[in-house]
Amino acid sequence: MSLGGIASTFKFLREITMTTPNASMANLDPVQLDEKDSLRHMRQRFHLPEDVIYLDGNSLGPASHAALAALKQAAHEEWAEGLIRSWNTAGWFNLPKTLGTRIAPLVGAAPEQLIVCDTVTLNLYKLLHAALTLRPGRRHIVAEASSFPTDLYIAQGVARHFPGVELKLSGRDADTLEELIDEDTAVVLINHVDYRSGVLQNMAALTATAHQAGALVVWDLCHSVGAMPIELDACQVDFAVGCTYKYLNGGPGAPALAYVAHRHHSHLDQPLAGWWGHARPFDFETDFTPAPGVQSLQTSTQAMLSMRCLDGALSDWAEVDLQALRKKSLQLTQYFMDLVGARLSAYPLQCITPKEPKLRGSQVSIQFEHAYPLVQALIARGVIGDFRAPDVMRFGFTPLYLGFEDVARAVDILQELLETEAWQDPAYAVRQAVT
Ligand SMILES: Cc1ncc(COP(=O)(O)O)c(C=O)c1O
């Protein structure tokens, strides 16, 4: 994104952060808040290192005991002992569909519309391409300049294959998505929660706006699935992709989810048709015949150890009340923002995450000129958040394993680092490959 684009996004964010927040939580006792927490028992399901306050579950979720057990079983029994028989005997072959069915309630979708396969980036390519094919003659893919970069790279790549099609971006070609959506729009690609700022978009309203113009919509749920209730069917979403290694804790690089609304199944034409998406892969036919519905989205042999790990992680979700999850997520993020506001106002920290609950996801992002070394100093003290260029510290608040005492302790450590300026140690300025 251009610097102008970043500047206009942040200007917009500063404006919305000025909307009225709830009454401050800064004076509340974290111990009492933890005692009232209905999700508190879930923490014991996770393997979390001692002395770590993990505020990066929005980037890579931690290992749950169930995920590790499933991974162990898949490696030691299903692979080592079962060998190739496990494709049939351990349910491997159907796992992409099985996992889709398990995730369906988390995103408000009737089963059969979801599949877990490949990666977010690849699924985005397939679905954007499919959407453009369904809207011949329309010339624009509309997206946000602030989108996660892979979304933009994929959209640019897809556009190159459709003569005359180009990308129109809010934050670059207009201020808002709504201004760009018109009868020339083929598809609108939207990040449900912005990875950098944590801003939550209105799924129902934007989907309706796209549909009124005759366009289709693809939602990127990477930063919302597992963080809040989502209503794909009720919002009449066309397509969606989402990540399973963040809030769903499926493990590093776990396969991605893809959603295609029923009404598009019979016209779904995806460009990466491979043998796993064939109606009869083991007939080894010369020509491609798609498997029914979302199953045709699978491209190649799926990574079973990863899938089984995710399978284990999902077992913890069966009993999670998503309304309670969202309520706690908003409390955790508000508590953090209120404590930072009350105790650290002397420092040049700019919270770019909206205080208005309906406008934020489950993270808090703070702009600070020296964000990188400060995040490294926090990590060295066991408070793991992350840094997003150019100057954003990102803190994810995951209700299943974080408590209010964790939040208070993280703010204590942040305050101590700012007061002592310990973050100025040159060791913290050394840039690592992954930030
Ligand atoms: C919003 C968003 N979209 C897409 C991706 C890309 O995911 P993957 O690398 O699994 O394809 C990410 C990764 O963090 C993301 O945050």
Image (tube, rainbow, N blue to C red):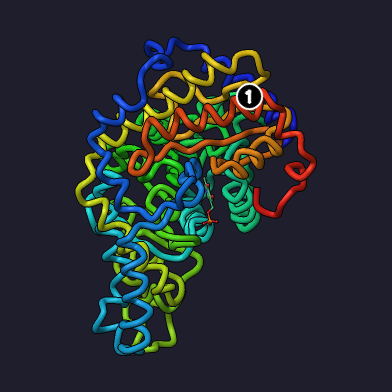
Q: Is residue 234 above or below residue 250?
A: above
Q: Where residue 183 sits: x, y (%)? A: 50, 34
Relative horizontal placement of residue 271, taking residue 423 as reference (left or right)? left
Q: Is residue 54 above or below residue 118?
A: above
Q: Where residue 337 sits: x, y (%)? A: 49, 22
Within-10-Å neighbours for mark 1: few <14, some 14–19, many 20+: some
Relative horizontal placement of residue 98, taking residue 84 as reference (left or right)? left
Whether residue 144 is visible here, answered yes or no, is no
Q: Where residue 362 sits: x, y (%)? A: 43, 34
Whether residue 89 is visible here, answered yes or no, is yes
Choose top left, top right, bottom left or bottom right for residue 303: bottom left
The amino acid type found where label 1 is placed reads Phe
Which residue is rendered at x = 46% and y = 55% of the image?
A: 127
Which residue is rendered at x = 51% and y = 48% of the image?
A: 59
Q: Is residue 275 above or below residue 221?
A: below
Q: Where residue 234 sits: x, y (%)? A: 26, 38
What residue is shown with label 1? 10
Relative horizontal placement of residue 137, taking residue 260 as reference (left or right)? right
Choose top left, top right, bottom left or bottom right for residue 92: bottom left
Which residue is rendered at x = 50% and y = 61% of the image?
A: 253
